[in-house]
Image (cartoon, rainbow, N blue to C red):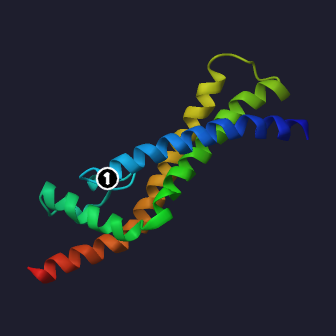
Amino acid sequence: MNALSIFLGEFWPPFIGVTFGLSVVWLARRSASDGYPPFIGPKSFTELSGFVKNQQRQLLHEASTEAFAGWRSFIPVVLFAAMFAVGAALGRTLPKVTTVPDSLWVHPGFAALFAALGGSLAGRLGVRHLRPFLKASIERTQHAA
């Protein structure tokens, strides 16, 4: 039970900080010209390879506006923040409850490992959610031409 209380005490500060920081960055990026979600870009979709760069951005922006309406746009951010916070909390908890040495590499090592996993998972989930909207946007563009 002591390990769980230590873990939860170490989990919340990075989770809140990363969620708030990435949310601000995401809102700023969304108001910018490209406006697509974090962890996703035009290179994430093979469907966009036949379009010029400006058209890729426009199609991706339209699809992401439809797919990530409202609070759904923050799901990848919260997922990444949760994974990062788990890694940071494990990096600080393990030396306190096990024989893992309390050295400088443990904290950022676990945080970086889980951040990479969280970024990959958030990107994959975002691409999976966005792909049907992108295909519909491409079909609308092709039917209009």
34 relative position to 120: left or right: left
83 relative position to 24: left or right: right
Please tell me how many numbered marks the rendered image carries. Answer: 1
Residue 83 place in picture, x, y as percent: 60, 45
Please identify the residue farthest to the top as the structure is shown.
103
Residue visible at 77% across and 31% down?
93
Residue visible at 49% across and 64% down?
72
The residue type indicated by label 1 comes to: Ser
Residue 78 in sight here: yes
Please identify the residue farthest to the bottom as the structure is shown.
143
Quadrant of the rendered image containing residue 11: top right
Residue 119 place in picture, x, y as percent: 49, 46
Please tell me whether mark 1 sits on a helix, a strand or a loop: helix
Residue visible at 15% across and 62% down?
55
Quadrant of the rendered image containing residue 45: bottom left
Work out which quarter of the rendered image holds the C terminus and state it.
bottom left
Question: Callout 1 environment at 10 Å: few (<14), some (14 to 19), or many (20+)?
Answer: few
Task: Give the residue pinned by disc 1.
Answer: 31
Whether residue 97 is situated above or below residue 37 in the rendered picture: above
Residue 18 place in picture, x, y as percent: 55, 40
Residue visible at 66% across and 24% down?
106
Residue 98 in sight here: no
50 relative position to 128: left or right: left
53 relative position to 134: left or right: left
Quadrant of the rendered image containing residue 115: top right
Please identify the residue farthest to the right as the structure is shown.
1
33 or 120, nearer to the observer: 33
Whether residue 99 is situated above or below residue 138 in the rendered picture: above
Work out which quarter of the rendered image holds the N terminus and state it.
top right
86 or 36, nearer to the observer: 36
Residue 51 place in picture, x, y as percent: 14, 62
Whether residue 49 is situated above or below residue 4 in the rendered picture: below
